[in-house]
Image (tube, helix red, strand yellow):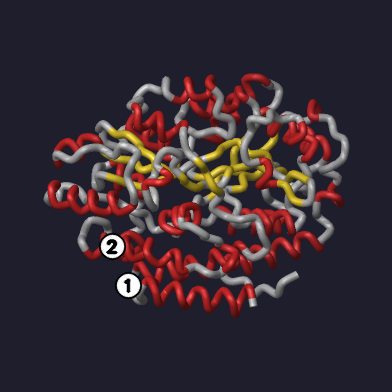
């Protein structure tokens, strides 16, 4: 095993889960993996976040309960930003819910290696071959989470603002240079009414695309020079005033929902989950009423525009191994449902991209009141290659933390893109890969 120096949240994760695994509270000791009687349980608990604006958890719970009226799925809300930190603490304290969502693959290795996920191979063997993402949660032949969602990142755009600016909508053929040029044109044409684009503060909004699209990109290699032109482009957009400054985003705790939903920006790269959020906020009045659509993410060059390359980790649900055998049996039954076409159709009906995309699911998705049905939006939904954001490896969390530090420093203007990435590569070698 390679010597690894973990930083920040990764250190907390490793320490907390190692202590828990050594405490005798892991799945094998608790008996969660044994035979149980699901009918002996009337309530199972599931972790979620931002429940008022993220309806997918309640939708899954309601759809399951409709078919299984004797079992209640009770939601436990966590902070979206601190989800993994809070979950790790609850697992260590023995207060975690029966089931919890693997928000992305960044920390999956930490949970699995810390014996904080029940073996779900039996459930996985029974799900449809159409379910994507199972391989991501499989280690040494055993599966530890069941995916219910497979996102993809799109380019959202406000049709009304494009019309006001007299600029043609994205058509699926854009490169990142096209995107940047249009952002500046929109900013000029809208003359203070809105900016051309909005990039949220997450490292995903830039590094995710670069790791998926740049030729030869390999996060685990520690050779990250391919990130430099992606950062140079965004820095130029900030300096041109076409994109909100990173410091203003972080200092003022700006949300991407408010920027696009209240028409502060004409474009925004964001994950497919935002479809459901925007629809819900427009219905509730938390977002303005305006015409919008989504297009494939811009590409590095024209060679991939017919099959656009984008990124996103699958989102899966695992079982806390500290639960007893009866609860484990009930939770496994819920997860078998989560991977079904019925669950997928229920998620599609609110704008979530499920792990299954059959004709039934696609029809459900585009039958939603208010969803854009133009040709470009339908193409973006149905035609793309999705690559995972986070490789499943021991080094992933530590390397991502280093890259996050570089991301903040570069976009805050304290270091140039070239120097910031060079420093990150040096840290990767000395702290993780050396």
Residue labelled with disc 1: 413
Q: Toward the viewer: 43 or 181? A: 181
Q: Residue 409 lies in what quarter of the image?
A: bottom left
Residue ID at (37%, 36%)? 278
Q: Would residue 146 appear left or right of 81 to someone viewing this image?
A: right
Residue placed at 24% from the left, 47% from the top? 264
Quadrant that contains the N terminus: bottom right
* Front in this rendered view, residue 41 or 249: 249
Apparent side of residue 213 relative to residue 14 in the rendered image (left or right): left
Q: Secondary structure at mark 2?
A: loop
Give me the C-alpha separation between circle 1 and circle 2. Answer: 10 Å
Image position, residue 69 (x, y; %): 67, 20
Residue at point 25% right, 44% down?
266
Q: Position of residue 263 (x, y in %)?
A: 24, 42
* Label number found at residue 245: 2
Query: Residue 248: in sight, yes or no?
Result: yes
Residue 175 vertical placement versus 131 (above, below):
below
Q: Position of residue 8 (x, y in %)?
A: 56, 69
Q: Residues within 10 Å of mark 2 (few under 14, many from 20)?
A: many
Q: Which mark is residue 129?
A: none
Instruction: Identify the residue at image location x=45%, y=70%.
Output: 406
- Horizontal relation, residue 64 to residue 218: left or right: right
- Please state, as top left, top right, bottom left or bottom right, where the C terminus lies in the image: bottom right
User: In which quadrant of the rendered view does residue 396 lie?
Assistant: bottom right
Is disc 1 surrounded by few (<14), some (14 to 19) or many (20+) residues within 10 Å? Answer: some
Total labels drawn: 2
Q: Secondary structure at mark 1?
A: loop
**Who comes first in sequence, dot 1 or dot 2?**
2
Residue 415 versus residue 72 in the image, above or below:
below
Residue situated furthest front in the rendering: 303
Residue 53 seen in render: no
On the image, the x and y values in percent for residue 414 come to: 35, 76
């Amino acid at each position: 095993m390679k010597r690894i120096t973990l930083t920040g949240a990764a250190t907390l994760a490793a320490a907390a889960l190692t202590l828990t695994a050594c405490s005798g509270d892991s799945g094998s000791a608790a008996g969660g993996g044994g035979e149980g009687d699901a009918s002996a349980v009337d309530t199972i608990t599931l972790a979620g976040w931002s429940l008022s604006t993220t309806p997918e958890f309640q939708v899954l719970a309601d759809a399951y309960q409709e078919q299984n009226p004797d079992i209640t799925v009770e939601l436990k809300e966590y902070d979206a930003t601190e989800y993994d930190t809070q979950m790790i603490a609850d697992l260590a304290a023995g207060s975690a819910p029966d089931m919890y969502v693997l928000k992305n693959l960044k920390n999956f290795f930490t949970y699995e290696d810390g014996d904080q996920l029940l073996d779900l191979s039996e459930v996985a063997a029974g799900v449809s071959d159409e379910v994507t993402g199972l391989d991501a949660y499989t280690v040494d032949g055993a599966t530890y989470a069941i995916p219910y969602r497979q996102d993809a990142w799109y380019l959202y755009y406000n049709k009304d603002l494009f019309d006001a600016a007299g600029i043609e909508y994205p058509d699926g053929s854009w490169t990142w240079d096209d995107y940047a040029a249009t952002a500046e044109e929109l900013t000029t044409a809208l003359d203070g009414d809105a900016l051309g684009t909005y990039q949220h503060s997450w490292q995903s909004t830039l590094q995710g695309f670069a790791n998926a699209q740049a030729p030869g990109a390999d996060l685990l290699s520690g050779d990250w020079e391919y990130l430099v032109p992606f950062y140079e482009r965004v820095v130029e957009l900030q300096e041109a005033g076409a994109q909100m400054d990173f410091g203003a985003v972080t200092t003022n705790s700006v949300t991407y929902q408010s920027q696009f939903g209240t028409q502060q920006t004409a474009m925004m790269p964001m994950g497919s989950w935002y479809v459901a959020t925007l629809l819900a906020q427009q219905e509730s009045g938390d977002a303005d009423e305006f015409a919008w659509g989504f297009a494939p993410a811009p590409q590095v060059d024209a060679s991939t525009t017919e099959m656009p390359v984008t990124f996103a980790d699958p989102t899966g649900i695992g079982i806390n191994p500290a639960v007893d055998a009866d609860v484990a049996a009930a939770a496994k039954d819920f997860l078998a449902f989560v991977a079904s076409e019925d669950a997928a159709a229920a998620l599609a009906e609110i704008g979530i991209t499920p792990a299954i995309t059959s004709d039934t699911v696609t029809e459900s998705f585009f039958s939603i009141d208010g969803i854009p049905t133009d040709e470009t939006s339908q193409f973006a939904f149905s035609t793309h290659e999705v690559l995972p954001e986070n490789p499943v490896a021991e080094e992933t969390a530590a390397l991502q933390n280093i890259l996050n530090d570089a991301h903040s420093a570069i976009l805050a203007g304290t270091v140039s893109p070239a120097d910031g990435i060079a420093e990150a590569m040096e840290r990767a070698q000395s702290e993780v890969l050396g």
